[in-house]
Amino acid sequence: MEVASGKYSGTEFQATYTLKKSNGTNVNFWVKNNGKVSVQITINGKEARTLAPGEQGHITATVGFFSSDYKFKAVPTPNGGTIDIDYKIAQRDI
C-alpha cells in the first residue's frame, strides 16, 4: 500500500503518518537525491542512511501491532543546505 510519494525541495523533509500492521508488517522509505548535498533519511530517528548526490536507496522499519505514528525525515548532511529529493513511502509484507 502506498502511503505517500512526491518531490520535495527545501531545508528539511518531515512527514508523520499513522500506520497499523494490518496494512503490512514493514514500511519502506525510498529517496532519490537530486540535489548537490548528501541527504540522511530516517524513520522515527532510526534506520539512518546517507545518500550522496545522484544516489537513491531505501530504509525499512517494522510496523507494530497497534496503530502508531511513524516520522519520516530527510535532512541535508553533514553541514546543512538545501535538499532536492523524490520520495515514496510504502507499507507492505516482505
Image (spheres, rainbow, N blue to C red):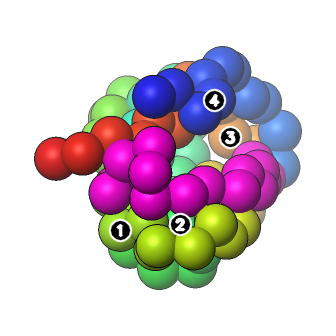
Residue 83's disc is 3
For mark 4, what is the residue?
4
Spatial CA distance of label 1 from label 2 is 10 Å
The outermost residue toward the right is 10
Spatial CA distance of label 1 from label 3 is 27 Å
For mark 2, what is the residue?
43
Give the amino acid at mark 4. Ala
Q: Residue at x 60, y 55 (%)?
A: 19
Disc number lying in front (1 or 4):
1
Sequence-wise, the earlier of marks 1 and 4 is: 4
> Which secondary structure, mark 3?
strand
- Image x and y of residue 70, in percent: 64, 65
> Which secondary structure, mark 2?
strand
- Image x and y of residue 5, in percent: 61, 24
Sequence-wise, the earlier of marks 3 and 4 is: 4
- Image x and y of residue 82, in percent: 76, 43
Q: Residue at x 51, y 37 (%)?
A: 89
Residue 62's disc is 1
11 vs 84, left or right, is: right
The quarter of the rendered structure image containing the N terminus is top left
